Amino acid sequence: MLSILIPIHEFDVREFVKDLSSLSVKLDVPCELICLDDASSEKYRSINSSLSQLENVIYRESEVNLGRSAVRNAMAELAQYDNLVFLDCDGKVVRKDYLEKYAAIDEYDVVYGGRVYQEDRPVEAELNFHWYCGMAREEIPVQIRDKAPYKSFMTNNFMVKKSVYDAIKMDENVKGYGHEDTLFAMDLKRQGFNIQHIDNPIEHIGIEDVDVFLGKSSNAVANLAQLMINKQVDESIKLIRYYRKLESIGLSSIASKVIMAFEQPIMRSLKSAAPNLLWFDLWKLALLEKEMRKLG
């Protein structure tokens, strides 16, 4: 029995949910799809309201913006079954046995299915960096993900036992975009819950303009800094590890200033046809130092 939970914000999810609904009726077990709109504009609420006509689909709307963590917690409360499948709204079904694979798993705490991107480079140049970064950093084969199960976890496509989710839940203090999945994985590890990795991906189709993506990346670094101050994350995260190394030899501030002196050429690289992800990492490292200094 599956409860498929899809928080919606400013995205047309009709095709995605229609495909999931079609797959759900073919299952040998009961299945529900709960779609909760998190205070989208009238345009998207009007578009997505037709979802309630699909089989097994429950569509709800929140008048206030709950945020990425709180909306997932609210959906878990609505679910009637013990197996919760959380999906981001900007996904696309790529395999006909997608729900069957999850439904066939009995013994587990958390299962992560993976993420893929379209094979071809986007036609729009401004979408290139997000696509390039996603292909390099997020489209990871299951054999590699399985070597670092907590590090490789993301919240775009995972199944979790309701009892496990109720014991952890998403931390609603993490605001905006970024690292709510990192903290959730850390909390799972701290409480002794296992993450199993399987080959059951969803395609990420919500590729964003480079400036929007960089803005969200900046917010994610700010969230990470706050988690560091709160001692909720550790050096298993590469960005933290390098920051701590520089800090230990008294070079974090100097390194940040040197990197930010090259911010313009860094941005030119990231917006080019062949972006350098090392520059992206260095830029985030400089932002992290700035945020840590700000938080004292």
Image: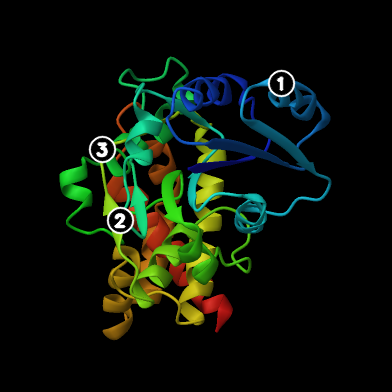
Q: Give left or right: position of 275 versus 55.
A: left
Dot 2: element: loop
**Nearer to the camera, 230 or 150:** 150
Image depth: mark 2 or mark 3 in front: 2
- Amino acid type of the residue that numbered disc 1 sits on in the rendered structure: Gln
Q: Position of residue 188 (x, y in %)?
A: 39, 69
Is residue 141 positioned above or below 131 on the image?
Answer: below
Calculate the distance from the C-alpha at mark 2 to the C-alpha at mark 1: 33 Å
Image quadrant occupied by the C terminus? bottom right
**Cα distance in 3D space between marks 3 and 1:** 31 Å
Crowd tier of the residue under label 2, counting other residues whose Cα lies within 10 Å: few below 14, some 14–19, many 20 or above: few
Residue indicated by mark 1:
53
Q: Position of residue 147 (x, y in %)?
A: 17, 56
Please report whichever mark, 2 or 1, sits nearer to the chain's N-terminal start. 1
Q: Tag 1: Cα neighbours inside 10 Å, few (<14), some, or many (≥20)?
A: few
Q: Looking at the image, which residue is at 20% across and 53% down?
A: 146
Q: Residues within 10 Å of mark 3 (few under 14, many from 20)?
A: some
**Residue under label 2:** 107
Q: Position of residue 51 (x, y in %)?
A: 69, 24
Residue 199 numbered mark, or none: 3
Callout 2–callout 3 Cβ contact below 8 Å: no
User: Callout 3: helix, strand or loop?
Assistant: loop
Residue 116 seen by the camera: no
Residue lying farthest to the front in this orientation:
28
Name the element at disc 1.
helix
Name the mark nearer the viewer: 3 or 1.
1
Q: Earlier in the sequence, mark 3 or mark 1?
A: 1
